[in-house]
Amino acid sequence: AQSVTQLDSHVSVSEGTPVLLRCNYSSSYSPSLFWYVQHPNKGLQLLLKYTSAATLVKGINGFEAEFKKSETSFHLTKPSAHMSDAAEYFCVVSSGGYQKVTFGTGTKLQVIP
Amino acid sequence: DAGVIQSPRHEVTEMGQEVTLRCKPISGHDYLFWYRQTMMRGLELLIYFNNNVPIDDSGMPEDRFSAKMPNASFSTLKIQPSEPRDSAVYFCASSPSLRGTEAFFGQGTRLTVV
């Protein structure tokens, strides 16, 4: 069995303040984990991925995420939010023989000027 | 590479009509995925192919939906007959392999069935 839980459907931050988007997963196998971003009326773009190498993963646009096996978490962070970060973010887990892919329900990030 | 290319970007059709969505994956990618995104259900995997062969179609909602991949550079998702509840954004994605690699998404086709 495999699942992803994004704990917040909406997050609102002020420009210049830190961003934290939370993701917990469950998997019977060693998972690969991804964060994607989707801007309005656009496709999904990969922000970063974890594939059993370093547990702290750095991605594009200043985002990073830490894989914590003991907490089954893969939270996405950014030290300082920018207006252009306003978008929907998806946490994704992939594992198993055919690498079944499961998307979280998404977190909409609002950045207030 | 131009990325994953989907056509059309927007489609409006009347209930009962046949709809065909098209996808050109990134050259060299062995896996192709079709997803549907709605406000109610979020992102759902409909079907995926490996080397042009359908591997898992358990996400296809019903027999009105069918997908084909006649060659490595082209796939179609067909809905016949279409219904208003099929209105959604349909994404195609491709990846070079499954283990540890990300999928690259197209811009999506916004389907409206009236």
Image (cartoon, rainbow, N blue to C red):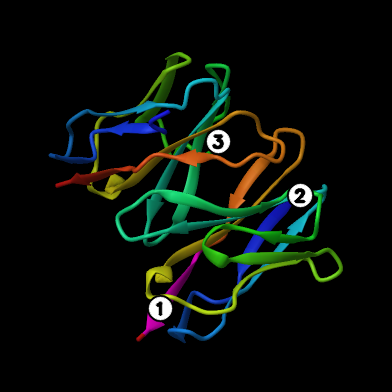
Amino acid residing under circle 3:
Ser
Instruction: Report how far apart the C-alphas of labels 3 and 2 lie in the structure.
Output: 21 Å
Instruction: Report how far apart the C-alphas of labels 2 and 1 lie in the structure.
Output: 29 Å
Amino acid residing under circle 2:
Pro
Q: Is residue B77 above or below residue B109?
A: above
Q: Specify whether A41 is left or right of A59.
A: left
Q: Position of residue A68 (x, y in %)?
A: 80, 67
CA neighbours of label 1 inside 10 A, class few (<14), some (14 to 19), many (20+): some
Nearest the eye: A43 or A77:
A77
Q: Specify whether A22 is left or right of B114.
A: right
The magenta segment is: A106-112
Q: Nearer the viewer, mark 2 or mark 1?
A: 1
Callouts 2 and 1 close, C-beta under 8 Å: no
Q: Are the residues flagged by discs 3 and 1 from a single subunit?
A: no
Q: Is residue A111 magenta?
A: yes
Callouts 3 and 2 close, C-beta under 8 Å: no
Q: Quadrant of residue A3?
A: bottom right
Dominant SS in magenta? strand
Q: Is residue B31 above or below residue A62?
A: above
Amino acid residing under circle 1:
Gln
Question: What label sits on residue B58 in the rendered view?
Answer: 3
Nearest the eye: A59 or A101:
A59
Identify the subunit bearing mark 1.
A
Q: Position of residue A76 (x, y in %)?
A: 62, 69
Q: Secondary structure at mark 1?
A: strand
Q: Residue at x 48, y 15 (%)?
A: B72
Q: Secondary structure at mark 2?
A: loop
Residue bearing mark 1: A110
Q: Is residue A35 above or below residue B50?
A: below
Nearest the eye: B57 or B99:
B99
Q: Specify whether A15 is left or right of A95.
A: left
Nearest the eye: A46 or B54:
A46
